[in-house]
Image: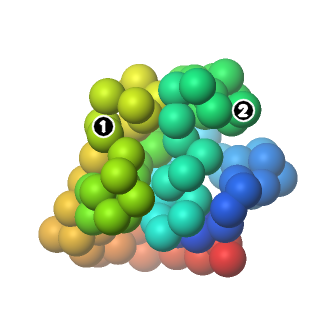
Amino acid sequence: MLHLIFQSPIDIAVLDRMGSGDVAVFLENAVLGLLQKGKFANLLNNQLNMNRLCVLSEDIEVRGILTSELVSGLEVIDYAGLVNLTVENPLIMSWC
């Protein structure tokens, strides 16, 4: 399943609902919660053991976030990558 996460701050319950092997893409203001020095860093590091976590490159660029500031292991994808994920995952859940 593909989870599109728009929430800011990130709702921990959303991450708890993800099944093993699910993919999450953080979009819009949700990218603000992905910083290495942020309060969700440890939680996201643990989540990376079970899930693929991605962030849309355009959304971090607009907010002035460098890839080096993100939690290590997050995949930075572009819109084409997002489209590919929607094709690969027929079940999609949006969290707003």
Residue drawn at x 27%, y 64% as measured from the top left: 58
**Is residue 30 visible to us here?**
yes
Amino acid under disc 1: Thr
Rendered location of residue 16, percent (x, y): 77, 46
Question: Which residue is at the far front?
Answer: 64
Determine whether 84 is above or below 11 in the image. Answer: below
- CA separation, marks 1 and 2? 17 Å
Residue picked out by circle 2: 39
Determine whether 18 is above or below 39 in the image. Answer: below
Rendered location of residue 67, percent (x, y): 30, 37
Determine whether 17 is above or below 46 in the image. Answer: below
Front residue of 91/94: it is: 94
Residue drawn at x 35%, y 52% as measured from the top left: 64
**For marks 1 and 2 on the same chain, the one whose residue lies earlier in the sequence:** 2
Q: Quadrant of the C terminus?
A: bottom right
Residue 67: which numbered mark, if any? Answer: 1
Element under disc 2: loop
Relative side of 2 to 87, left or right? right
Amino acid under disc 2: Lys
Other residues around mark 2 within 10 Å, as few (<14) / some (14–19) / many (≥20): few
